Image (cartoon, rainbow, N blue to C red):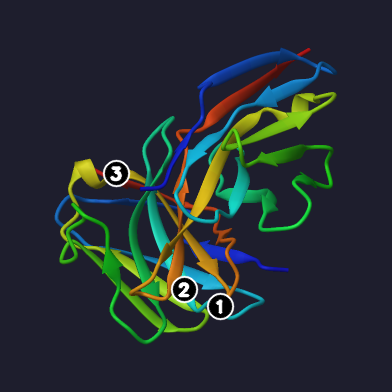
Amino acid sequence: AQSVTQLDSQVPVFEEAPVELRCNYSSSVSVYLFWYVQYPNQGLQLLLKYLSGSTLVKSINGFEAEFNKSQTSFHLRKPSVHISDTAEYFCAVSLTISFGGYNKLIFGAGTRLAVHP
Amino acid sequence: GAVVSQHPSRVICKSGTSVKIECRSLDFQATTMFWYRQFPKQSLMLMATSNEGSKATYEQGVEKDKFLINHASLTLSTLTVTSAHPEDSSFYICSAKIRDRYEQYFGPGTRLTVT
């Protein structure tokens, strides 16, 4: 069965410091991986995704994540964070439902990134 | 692109009444829509998956007669919470996906409070 583990429930960091949010997954088949961000009282926004090709994927606001098949990880990094990056971050893996002909997402528990001045 | 709206954003209802939440894909056709429930400071719990024109598939433990889902068109899905009780109070989020693509696009969520 596919599952997602986000090892850190909270990550406090000072502004302009680097950050890494960890995500590990378990799957016996090819995976499609995602990072979503959720700001307070809002829905989720797609931050970046890995479907195939280059294992390093980047977002427009400076985040990047690297797919590591041997370590079954998809950690999210940013070299210098801003106050506005404070949010909840969810890692997710796509699960194929063969009989239904669709995919659904399995989410990790989330990591609360708190950026302090 | 890929914008999903939800209405209402907040609703307060009395115990025993029913509440309908709408989810719309504004600029794309959503072959599949999903309904999630999120408790405070927790992850999203998938409630059900609906494909346009067919019955919704509910996750284990979710009462289909309690949470009625209709996916009437490629741009609209509704979730009706029937005979709501205070324990149904939660943040409900919908998402939508395009055929043959893996990512989901999420609505802004609906905060339901049952008094």
Per the image, label 2 sits on a secondary structure element best described as strand
Tell me if residue A117 comes above or below residue B70 in the rendering.
above
**Judging from the image, what secondary structure is the residue with disc 1 in?**
loop
Residue type pointed to by label 3 = Ser
Q: CA distance from mark 3 to mark 2?
A: 25 Å
Determine which residue is flagged by label 1.
B99
**At 61% across and 18% down in the image, what residue appears?**
A11
- Amino acid on which disc 2 is placed: Thr
Query: Which quadrant of the rendered structure holds the C terminus of chain A?
Result: top right
Marks 3,2: beta carbons within 8 A: no
Q: Which residue is mark 3?
A: B89
Looking at the rendered structure, the kind of residue marked 1 is Arg
Q: Position of residue B16 (x, y in %)?
A: 14, 55
Please give the name of the residue rendered at 50% of the width and 39% of the height, measured from the top-left corner: A25
* Front disc: 3 or 2: 2
The circle drawn on residue B32 is 2
- Chain at tag 1: B
What is the crowding at mark 3: few (fewer than 14 residues within 10 Å), some, or many (at least 20)?
Answer: some
